[in-house]
Image (cartoon, rainbow, N blue to C red):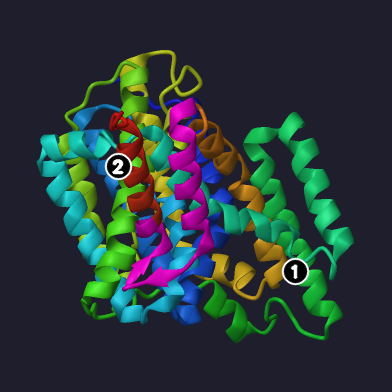
């Protein structure tokens, strides 16, 4: 058996750093909008870190292939705009149902194939509509803090050219520093300095069980869209990333195991788990190992890093939970800007798909809820209907 290399650890840490820094603030905001207390937010991050870590290590070790899992950032973006309409227990119930839907899909290759037949223009427009309000919030505080918005935009534009991989990490660190300065300037204290306060910050996280309740409205409005978004924007691209790098694992047990992990951890805040796409590529390339058969160790290293981040959830929450809303808007919007750009480009790629895609995007972005169905469900349905109508030959 070949020895571990520094490149394995470096690739795994980079994957976790990129994935974590780009969306952890979104996860915290989702938990708070769901009605979670600070202790519950810690539980969410612990459950997510533990679930991603265990699935990375287990499936990479068993298959001897780099299997990197992640939370669904597009799914979190969807929840950010929708979860406030439901009670916390209903949201947890929706996470469990989403896991069950993922498990059924993983067991049925034909069902996965049917979902993959949704035109990329429509699925991309759905994602774009979910992300658009969050990205627009970048400019929502221009009147109140123009200099702060200008600073973040300048760092984003310059950093995107010079060090794109670590851009969000820099913005994250900068946000913590600015938040602490703003807190002290207002007479508050960002982090308690007494011994009891520090001990609570560095204490191991305690998982908090929330008994799920199941409702038709949360199933239609939260569970189904979350499942669809995760499948289309995470699991299918994750499978494609494996194939693009010459790996052909049996995805049925992997996706099934990920779904089971989600079902078990959902009551503690594990809202969704899926195959990683972009961050997974960091563990599959030459930078992980020149020998292709040894790159699975980079994914195992990523799993260990995920578990460490889960155990550090109290520190993460202490840094971010009191962050001003303007900083959260800037961080979340800038983190999702590249994803929004890619989604819009794919949505408008094919000329005769543009009108249905535009309708899907605008309807989804509107954020309304009607008959217990969120705008994402309506947007998807309207886009598919218009696409079907356009395909039908016009009567002479």
Name the residue tied to disc 1: 179
304 vs 158, nearest the viewer: 158
Give the image location of residue 251, x and y in percent.
Answer: 20, 33
Residue 198 falls in which quadrant of the image?
bottom right
Q: State the SS at label 2.
A: helix
98 vs 180, nearest the viewer: 98
Magenta stretch: helix, strand or loop mostly: helix
Is the C-beta separation of discs 2 and 1 under 8 Å? no
Q: Quarter holding the N terminus?
A: top left
At horizontal 65% and vertical 76% (from top left) the residue drawn is 322
Stretch of the chain drawn in magenta = 350-378
Against 48, residue 233 (above or below) is: above
Query: Number of labelled discs?
Result: 2
At horizontal 73% and vertical 64% (from top left) the residue drawn is 140
Against 377, residue 11 (above or below) is: above
Residue depth check, mark 2 versus mark 1: number of the one nearer the observer: 1
43 vs 380, nearest the viewer: 380
Q: State the SS at label 1.
A: helix
């Amino acid at each position: 058996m070949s020895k571990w290399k520094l490149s394995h650890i470096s690739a795994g840490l980079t994957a976790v750093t990129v994935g974590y820094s780009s969306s952890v603030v979104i996860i915290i905001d989702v938990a708070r909008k769901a009605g979670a207390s600070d202790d519950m937010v810690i539980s969410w991050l612990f459950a997510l870190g533990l679930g991603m870590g265990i699935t990375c290590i287990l499936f990479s070790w068993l298959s001897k292939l780099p299997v990197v899992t992640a939370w669904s950032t597009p799914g979190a973006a969807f929840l950010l705009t929708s979860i406030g309409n439901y009670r916390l227990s209903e949201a947890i119930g929706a996470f469990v149902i989403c896991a069950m839907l993922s498990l059924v899909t993983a067991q049925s290759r034909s069902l996965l194939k049917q979902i993959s037949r949704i035109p990329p223009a429509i699925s991309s427009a759905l994602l774009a509509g979910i992300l658009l309000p969050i990205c627009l919030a970048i400019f929502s505080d221009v009147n109140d803090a123009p200099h702060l918005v200008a600073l973040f935009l300048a760092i984003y534009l310059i950093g995107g050219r010079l060090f794109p991989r670590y851009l969000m990490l820099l913005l994250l660190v900068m946000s913590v520093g600015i938040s602490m300065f703003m807190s002290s300037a207002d007479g508050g204290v960002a982090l308690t300095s007494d011994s009891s306060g520090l001990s609570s910050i560095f204490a191991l996280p305690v998982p908090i069980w929330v008994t799920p309740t199941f409702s038709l409205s949360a199933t239609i409005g939260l569970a189904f869209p979350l499942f669809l978004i995760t499948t289309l924007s995470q699991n299918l691209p994750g499978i494609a990333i494996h194939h693009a790098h010459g790996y052909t694992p049996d995805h049925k047990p992997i996706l099934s195991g990920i779904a089971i992990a989600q079902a078990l951890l959902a009551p503690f805040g594990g809202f969704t788990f899926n195959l990683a796409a972009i961050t997974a590529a960091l563990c599959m390339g030459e930078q992980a190992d020149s020998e292709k058969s040894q790159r699975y160790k980079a994914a195992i290293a990523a799993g260990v890093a995920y578990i460490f981040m889960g155990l550090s959830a109290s520190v993460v929450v202490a840094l971010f939970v009191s962050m001003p809303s303007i900083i959260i808007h800037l961080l979340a919007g800038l983190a999702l800007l590249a994803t929004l750009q890619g989604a819009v480009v794919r949505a408008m790629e094919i000329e005769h798909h543009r009108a249905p895609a535009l309708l899907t995007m605008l309807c989804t972005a509107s954020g309304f809820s009607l008959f217990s169905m969120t705008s994402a469900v309506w947007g998807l349905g309207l886009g598919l209907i218009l696409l079907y109508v356009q395909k039908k030959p016009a009567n002479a």
